[in-house]
Image (tube, rainbow, N blue to C red):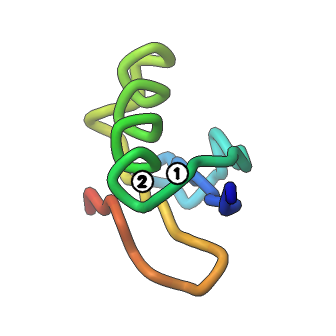
Amino acid sequence: MSNIYKLTVFESSGEKLLDEAFTAENDDMAKEIGQRLLIEKNYEQKTHRCTSSAGKLLLFHP
């Protein structure tokens, strides 16, 4: 069963740069997918977070 996760990236001004939902089978896979998306979009050094539909924080960079 797949779960829904959300990856959000912010500019230092607070502007939202990315707000993308994706599915993954579990939290570990979601972390991998989230990290891959950040690298692909060159956002790994921006403020970001990845959360599960249950509200669990999987990735965070201030």
Choose top left, top right, bottom left or bottom right for residue 34.
top left
Compared to residue 44, the image places residue 57 above or below, namely below
Q: Tell me if label 1 and label 2 are in contact, CB under 8 Å.
A: yes
- Please tell me the numbered disc located at residue 35: none
Give the image location of residue 54, x and y in percent.
Answer: 60, 85
**Most foreground residue, 58 or 3:** 3
Task: State how far apart marks 1 and 2 are (Cα).
Answer: 6 Å
Badge 2 crowding class, 10 Å Cα cut-off, few under 14, some 14 to 19, many 20 or more, is: many
Label 1 element class: strand
Residue shown at the point (56%, 60%) measured from the top left: 14
- Which x, y percent locates residue 23? 68, 47
Residue type pointed to by label 1 = Phe
Place residue 55 in its image quadrant: bottom right
Query: Where 39 sits versus 55, above or below?
Result: above
Nearest to N terminus: mark 1 or mark 2: 1
Report which residue position mark 2 lands on.
48
Mark 2 is on which residue type?
His
